[in-house]
Image (spheres, grey):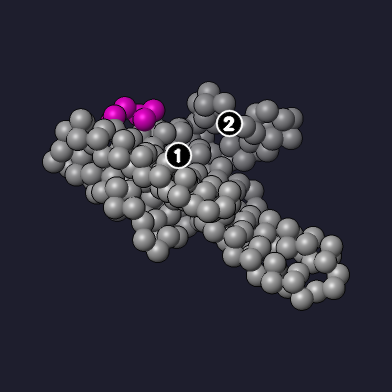
């Protein structure tokens, strides 16, 4: 199993190095072991390293095989597509195309075509949505599929596909939860005489829901990575 030392990991310029406190934390955690595997990093306590940081670390540092990174991107995109009732067939087809490409069943050019179609689906979904929030959510969902279908097999592209699909899926879940929370709070505002207080509550509920949904999605993505590593 691939592993990495603390000094090697620092070469990827993690954001923790941007502050003195972050650098101190990285040094403290990283010095616990001489070398770290992907599973070692994923097993770190949530109160020390967030799910999002774990995903960045294990994917960016090359600790997971390219084939599994691409599959991770596909699974993240599939989770995002579950957030819409009737996903664009081009988004679904892009994920299917990626898996065929991984098996050598289609060419780079065919995968490029599927990726381009998924990108077009993302733009179409965004422009068709009525509100700004809905447009953003539609964009995130569809773009997760397009990101997953990135074609080249190079390590950087495998990481890009995995990270972008995971990020877009997390934001799609966050926006969906925020819309639901804002809608529920909006109804309360209609019947509440304290309109300003209700509006503040609506924003607070939206922000809390968005953060919770994004965090839950990231944790689910960590579980997907664990599953892929063990498989």
The 10 Å Cα crowd at callout 1, few under 14, some 14 to 19, many 20 or more, is: many
Rendered image: mark on residue 95: none
Q: On the image, which quarter does residue 215 sit in?
A: bottom right
Farthest residue, direction top:
11
Q: Position of residue 164 (x, y in %)?
A: 45, 39
Q: Position of residue 85 (x, y in %)?
A: 40, 64
Q: Are marks 2 and 1 in contact (CB under 8 Å)?
A: no
Quarter holding the N terminus is top left
Q: Is residue 139 magenta?
A: no
What residue lies at 45% left-to-right and 60% top-to-bottom?
A: 83
Element at badge 2? loop
The 10 Å Cα crowd at callout 2, few under 14, some 14 to 19, many 20 or more, is: some
Q: Which residue is mark 2?
A: 14
Question: Where 112 sits versus 141, above or below?
Answer: above
Residue 207 in sight: yes
Farthest residue, direction bottom:
191
Q: In this figure, what is the number of numbered marks? A: 2
Residue 39 in sight: no
Q: Along the polypeptide, which appears first: circle 2 or circle 1?
A: 2
Residue stretch in magenta = 152-157
Q: Position of residue 124 (x, y in %)?
A: 40, 45
Q: Nearer the viewer, residue 106 or 185?
A: 185
Rendered image: mark on residue 164: 1
What residue lies at 49% left-to-right and 52% top-to-bottom?
A: 129
Q: Position of residue 72 (x, y in %)?
A: 36, 47
Q: CA distance from mark 2 to mark 1?
A: 17 Å
Q: On the image, which quarter does residue 165 sit in?
A: top left
Element at badge 1? helix
Q: Nearer the viewer, residue 138 or 41?
A: 138
What residue lies at 26% left-to-right and 33% top-to-bottom?
A: 112
- Tell me the mark number nearer the camera, choosing from 2 and 1: 1
**141 to the left or right of 45:** left
């Amino acid at each position: 199993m691939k592993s990495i030392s603390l000094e090697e990991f620092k070469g990827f310029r993690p954001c923790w190095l941007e502050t003195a406190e972050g650098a101190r934390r990285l040094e403290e955690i990283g010095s616990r072991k001489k070398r770290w595997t992907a599973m070692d990093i994923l097993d770190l306590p949530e109160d020390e390293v967030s799910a999002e940081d774990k995903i960045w670390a294990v994917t960016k540092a090359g600790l997971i095989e390219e084939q599994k990174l691409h599959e991770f991107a596909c699974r993240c995109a599939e989770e995002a597509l579950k957030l819409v009732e009737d996903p664009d067939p081009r988004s679904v087809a892009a994920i299917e195309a990626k898996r065929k490409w991984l098996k050598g069943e289609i060419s780079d050019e065919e995968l490029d075509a599927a990726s381009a179609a998924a990108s077009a689906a993302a733009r179409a979904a965004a422009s068709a949505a009525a509100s700004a929030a809905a447009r953003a959510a539609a964009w995130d969902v569809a773009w997760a599929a397009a990101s997953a279908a990135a074609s080249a097999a190079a390590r950087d592209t495998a990481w890009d596909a995995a990270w972008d699909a995971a990020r877009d899926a997390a934001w799609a879940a966050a926006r969906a939860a925020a819309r639901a929370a804002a809608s529920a709070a909006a109804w309360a505002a209609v019947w509440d005489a304290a309109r300003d207080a209700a509006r503040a509550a609506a924003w607070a509920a939206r922000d809390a829901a968005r953060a919770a949904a994004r965090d839950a999605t990231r944790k689910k993505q960590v579980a997907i990575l664990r599953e892929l590593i063990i498989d």
